[in-house]
Image: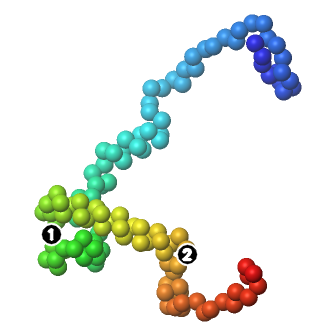
Amino acid sequence: MLAINDSNQVVLRKEKPSLTVVDLGTDALPKGLVTIKLLFGNKRYTPHFIYDSVLNTQQRAVLCYASGFSRSDTTKAFDDFSDEQKLRLQKSVLMLDNIYKAFNKVNAISPAKFIAGAMTDVSTKGALS
């Protein structure tokens, strides 16, 4: 069997390496797995909680408008929407996220970019001639 010694040289070993089980002394879950389990079991990570308890009135109005709902729908609780309406809300959240990403991707999300308006024409003379 080939092995690497302490001098980083490859040597031929005739005996097989012995394998042992490492006892960590605990059966506790690793920290990352505990965090993941908490996320899945936490009621705060649901659309119901976000819509009813996290979003403010203006954010709910934007989401309802993007979903094509009426003004009176902005006062409804999440559970008052039908399944079809909940799916429309979900699609609207994804659409709004894509719009944000489009602006953010080209670094055009800052207030200065919106106020400054369009860039002036830049001379392309000699750029790709």
State the image quarter where residue 79 is shown.
bottom left
Residue 107 got which mark?
A: 2
- The picture places residue 123, in percent across and down from the top left corner, at 69, 90
The residue nearer to you, when weighing 54 against 63, is 63
Q: Residue at x 36, y 70 (%)?
A: 96
Can you identify the residue that label 1 sits on?
76
**Label for residue 126?**
none
**Residue 56 visible in rendering:** no
In which quadrant of the rendered image does the N terminus lie? top right
Q: Residue at x 19, y 73 (%)?
A: 69
Q: Amino acid at mark 2?
A: Asn
SS at mark 1 in the image: loop
Crowd class of label 1 (few under 14; some 14 to 19; many from 20; radius 10 Å): few
Q: Is residue 101 above or below residue 112?
A: above
Left or right? Give the position of 127 relative to 55. Answer: right
Q: Horizontal and vertical percent for residue 91?
A: 30, 63
Q: Amino acid at mark 1?
A: Lys
Is 33 located above or below residue 64 in the figure? above
Residue 29: horizontal and vertical position, in percent? 44, 33
Position of residue 80 relative to residue 103, above or below, is above
